[in-house]
Amino acid sequence: MRIAINTRFLLSHKMEGFGWYTYEIVRRIVKNHPEHEFFFFFDRAFDPKFIFAENVTPVVLNPQARHPILHYIWFEFSVKKALKKHQIDLFFSPDGYLSLSSDVKQIATIHDINFEHNPEDLSWLTSKYYRYFFPKFAKKAHHILTVSEYSKQDITTTYKIDSEKITAVWNGASAIFQPLSLSEKNATREKYAEGKEYFLFVGALSPRKNVKRLLQAFDIFKTKYPENNTQFVIVGEELWTNALAEIQLPEDVQKQIHFTGHIELKELAAIMASATIFTFVPYFEGFGIPLVEAMKSGTPILSGNKTSLPEIAGECALYCDPFDVNDIANQLEQLAFDKELQQRLSSKGLARSEKFSWDISAEKIWEVLTSEH
């Protein structure tokens, strides 16, 4: 079989959600199935490290698709033409976009449809593009993959699609995430939190990640316990540090919040395993890979109680209402001072983390790609 894959998010220096998903799934699929030919569709010059095996042919298609108008051109003209030229039997798109005008069999992963429920989280043009095209992609797809039972139900209900057409396959997390010794934790704390214990947030700093309310809750915690010197580390793009100015935190609290910007995976694993509590309270999430990374690291979790998060974290987290700053602060306080609860959540997390494996995910996705449905 000749399989084309949309690999435009395999970017050497800026791997984010779609990119990591593509990397973990596609790398395993091409290596496990040398009997098939794979064509990787990039929208710019690619790093050779992403050509995972000899059965992969890289294809660069113009233009670089990072704007709604360019998305349309790339998928409706460049991809369509390449699918025909290379006599492709199946097109797999890990970011959900499809070529509506192509007759080739297509399967898409739609991770979530937050844009349908919170369109204000995106720019006007991007929101309009998503809400116009994704219902069409969902109907066009021969089959839809998604990352949680929550997202499956949401896509089914919102787009009025038969649930039989959708398969939920949980994400995994890198094996690099694991518990650290106390000396290793102390070294990481010296580097990122002035040698102090710290609460942690990891994620793309978009509105739905709810970082503003998280920082407001931290302010409440610090106001109540000014002698407590626990810091707050935020791993994400630095462009959102203006959140601090926006919510006008006291200067002494601001000094205890540390933005790292984008960091390498190995360093992220050290930061995750060295945190006292991992705080993750988005008001909308299709899966939440950082939850699994925290579980694998043995780090206790404070999680939001909306959308897919309880499905993923199970009994391994203390939950709060992401829309209620006081509830976030109260649950943060409870977990911060209850060492027994921390230990219990840590142990449960380590056990539950075994349910999440990229090997299993890739195997299940391959079954979907090669079945006739």
Image: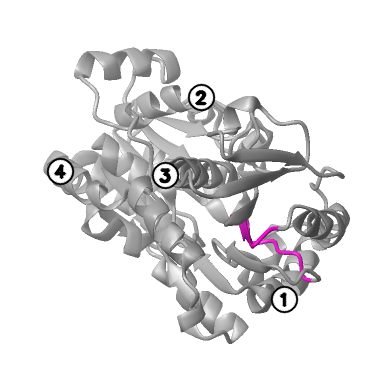
Tag 1–tag 4 contact (CB < 8 Å): no
Q: Nearer the viewer, mark 1 or mark 2?
A: 1
Label 2 packing within 10 angstroms: few (<14), some (14-19), many (20+): few
Neighbours of disc 4 within 10 Å: few (<14), some (14-19), many (20+): some
Residue type of the residue flagged with mark 3 = Asn
Question: Where 13 falls versus 4 (above or below)?
Answer: above
* Residue kind at label 4, given as amino acid type: Ser
Magenta-drawn segment? 88-100
| Residue under numbered circle 1 | 136
Distance from label 3 to label 4 (Cα)? 33 Å
The residue that label 2 is drawn on is 264
Q: Earlier in the sequence, mark 3 or mark 2?
A: 3
Q: Tell me which residue sits at (59%, 35%) in the image.
A: 15
Residue found 80% across the figure and 48% down from its top? 65
**For the residues marked 1 and 4, what is the alpha-carbon distance in whole angstroms?**
44 Å
Q: Is residue 63 visible?
A: yes
Q: As displayed, is residue 152 above or below residue 343? A: below
**Nearest-to-viewer mark from 1 and 3:** 3
Between discs 1 and 4, the one toward the N terminus: 1
Tag 3 near tag 4, CB within 8 Å: no
Tell me where residue 258 appears, x and y as whole percent.
51, 26
Q: Is residue 77 above or below residue 236?
A: below
Give amino acid for label 1: Lys
Q: Give the residue drawn at x 33%, y 40%.
A: 294
